[in-house]
Image (cartoon, rainbow, N blue to C red):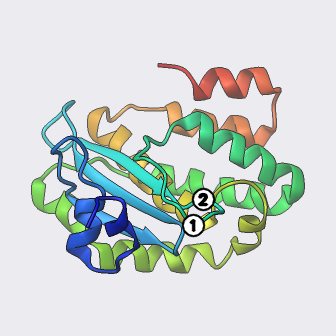
Amino acid sequence: MSRTSKCYSSNKQDLIECMTCRNYKPLEVYRISDSYIVAVYQGKLSEYDIILRYRQKDSNGKWSQIRTPKHIHWAVDMLIKLTHKEDLAKRFLDFLLRLWEDTKGFKTKEEREEFLREESLLKSVEQEAKNFEELSKHGEYSIKFLILLAKLLMKQEKTNREDAYMFRKLLETLKEHREIYKIVSIATHK
């Protein structure tokens, strides 16, 4: 069975193999509906750093190559959602800003393992997504996928730098619906 064909399986071990990248085995793998698989790997910036990758099923039912989520992809999708459902999208951005304020970086291996546990993380994502599900009808990404990515990106940023601000700044700029140049500039800053 090829690596990509294992992505269709509901077996956890097959999903891990599907998301194994250049012999880097994921710490955890999450299936979001039938369209997304998100994997978390050990990062290199700090002891508890994480790296995110995902696969997305296209309209023909084929799985993409393993991709790295970028802030710019997230920002463009939110701009589309803001165009179609501005009030709801702004409430979603408010929710994420509150989440940002409450997020702390990982300090121990046990803390990271507990946070990454599939059952509890996906359960909270499912609950939170109910308030914003209408946004899934617009843009590329489902709201569940965006919430999971946001939670993981926030943990990643704050684990590596307690005073991190990039993701928060992007959320604030999107909420203010400033000009596209500023949003793209923030989302692509390195």
Amino acid marked by disc 2: Asp
Please say if the residues under marks 1 and 2 sit with CB atoms less than 8 Å apart: yes
Amino acid marked by disc 1: Gly
Q: Which residue is mark 2?
A: 58
Q: Nearer the viewer, residue 12 or 175?
A: 12
In the image, 31: left or right of 140? Answer: left
Mark 1–mark 2 Cα distance, whole angstroms, equals 5 Å
- The relative height of residue 119 versus residue 14 in the rendered view (above or below) is below
Q: Residue at the spot x=76%, y=54% of the render?
A: 90
Quarter of the image where one finds residue 24: top left
In the image, 153: left or right of 139? Answer: left
Residue 58 position in % (x across, y down): 60, 59
Q: Residue at the spot x=17%, y=52% of the render?
A: 25
Q: Secondary structure at mark 2?
A: loop
Is residue 102 visible to the viewer in this orientation of the structure? no
Instruction: Say few, some or many: other residues with alpha carbon within 10 Å of mark 2 (under 14 / 14 to 19 / 20 or more).
Output: few
Q: Nearer the viewer, residue 2 or 35?
A: 2
Residue 26 position in % (x across, y down): 22, 55
Is residue 179 visible to the viewer in this orientation of the structure? yes
Residue 153 position in % (x across, y down): 42, 46
Q: Secondary structure at mark 1?
A: loop
Q: Which residue is mark 1?
A: 61
